[in-house]
Image: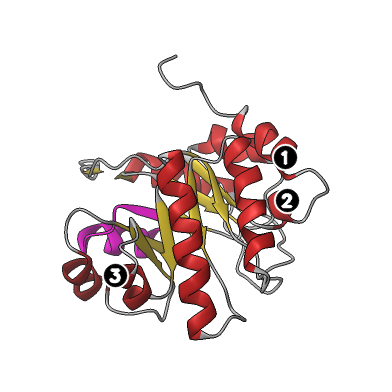
Amino acid sequence: MTPERPLVRSRRVAGLYAVTPDELDTNLLAQKVRWALAGGARIVQYRSKSADVALRSTQAATLLALCRRAGIPFIVNDDIDLALAIDADGAHLGRNDGDIRTVRATLGKDRVLGVSCYDQLELGVAAFNQGADYVAFGSAFPSSTKPRAARAPLRLYREAKARLKLPIVAIGGITPDNAALLIDAGADAVAVISALFEVPDIEAAAHRFSNLFPREGS
């Protein structure tokens, strides 16, 4: 039996992927993101389930400015209109956030498109074929953010790495103590909320995650 040909698309998504917590205080949220960037976060995703439309726009624009100054990509979760309105670097889609091909065409080729694929490699293949730049699998471990989420076993990251030659992101219950297992299994990036933003020292936590990845140029 002939092995399946690996699918290849080149996009730079790697390292600590900081996903913002629900925080209605924009100044506090911005400070938390500053600390994460200072600790080595390589990509930031704005995710808010509680803010209204006006606040989401304000917060996203504020964080975009921080990421621009740091030279770090800024991604908007779930909201394509907001991503376009503030000229974000890309968007991330969940299961019910729109047709991937349509969103790809709307975003254009120069913005990053990420897609959640949960615990199913087949969704990752479909996302690639429809134009995704990276795919995310999880929950890697039990997650306080999504306690009922399906679990993605370590072997899924290995299979995805072998089949999909595009960045693989792990998400869900990831801490500095278990992230290495995912990196060793093939994850290019680890997406983190609680273990990054809900700790006393965000910058130190970011450093711990960042130090698990190879140094650029090494």
The disc labelled 1 sits on which kind of residue?
A: Ala
Q: Which residue is mark 3?
A: 84
Choose mark 3 or mark 1, whichever is in front: 3
The disc labelled 3 sits on which kind of residue?
A: Leu
Using the image, determine if residue 194 lies above or below residue 43. below
x then y, percent, for residue 47? 54, 68
Query: What count of labels does the image hold?
Result: 3
Using the numbered discs, state the Cα–Cα distance from disc 2 to disc 1 in whole angstroms.
7 Å
The residue at the far bottom in this view is 52
Using the image, determine if residue 38 lies above or below residue 143. above
Q: Which residue is mark 1?
A: 205
Viewer can see residue 117: no
Q: Secondary structure at mark 2?
A: helix
Q: Which residue is mark 2?
A: 195
Image quadrant in which you'd find residue 117? bottom left
x then y, percent, for residue 203? 70, 39
Using the image, determine if residue 71 lies above or below residue 92. above
Q: Could you tell me if the residues under marks 2 and 1 are in contact, i.e. CB atoms within 8 Å?
A: yes
The residue at the far right in this view is 200
Badge 3 or badge 1: first in the primary sequence: 3
At 40% from the left and 76% from the top, the residue drawn is 79
Considering the image in quadrants, where does the C terminus appear? top left
